[in-house]
Amino acid sequence: MFKFRLFAVSTLLCTLGCSAQSAKPADENAAVNRRIEQKVRSTFSLPPSIQVGIGKREASEMPGYDKVPVTLSRDGRTSSHDFLVSKDNKTLIEWQKLDISKDVMESINVAGRPERGNKEAKVVIVNYDDFQCPFCSKMHQTLFPELMKTYGNQVKIIYKDYPLISLHPWAMHAAVNSNCLAEQNNDAYWEFADYTHANQKEISGEKQTGRDPTECVREKAR
């Protein structure tokens, strides 16, 4: 009977010791995760309304670091971001792997877009334009004629539409008009763009008085 009790006590102590050992890493991981969350919140100034979830830690391709996914969520929307944590749990690095195997320009579709300059130029500028935007107007005046005078046939400039319709009520109408002109004649597009950017303050929407830039271009072509 005594031997049985001694064995039972020994087994109990062994079990408690194993439980304590297994609980220790879990506590350490929880502490590290709390520090990760605190650092992410403070670094990126995240409000309390954004929930921060720390994912499972796993080996990374960087020596001395593990990879940890961090999920940000609010109102049903989520985004995941990878971080690197040093093996000694002292350093956190935001990890973003970028693919540079392709030229960024290859991802921009410029087929059929109006262009100015040397068609064979090695330097290509793609400008996203809003005909009603005052900053776009300044950019247009910087490109034409200033930049073209300086670099001449060394560059090619291509325009793509980016009308901010929530701010500029007639920008979309102007973009449609310009594309109609571009389908007929490349030079007509640029005459329209030059005139519109130079006369933004005189142009208005449908419910106001003012000259339609398309008509002005047509008058010049007559």
Image (cartoon, grey):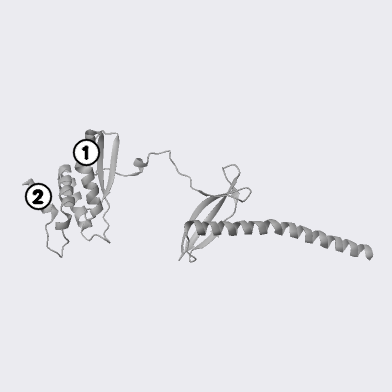
- The picture places residue 161, in percent across and down from the top left corner, at 26, 50
- The picture places residue 163, in percent across and down from the top left corner, at 26, 55
**Image check: 19 left or right of 100?**
right
- Seen at 66% across and 57% down, the residue is 28
State the separation of the CA atoms marked 2 and 1.
25 Å
Q: Earlier in the sequence, mark 2 or mark 1?
A: 1
Q: Is residue 2 visible?
A: yes
| Residue 120 position (above or below residue 189) | above
Mark 2 crowdedness (10 Å alpha carbons): few <14, some 14-19, many ≥20: few
- Residue highlighted by disc 2: 218
- Seen at 59% across and 59% down, the residue is 34
Q: Is residue 114 visible?
A: no
Residue positioned most to the left: 222
Element type at mark 1: helix
Which quarter of the image is occupied by the N terminus? bottom right
- Residue highlighted by disc 1: 148
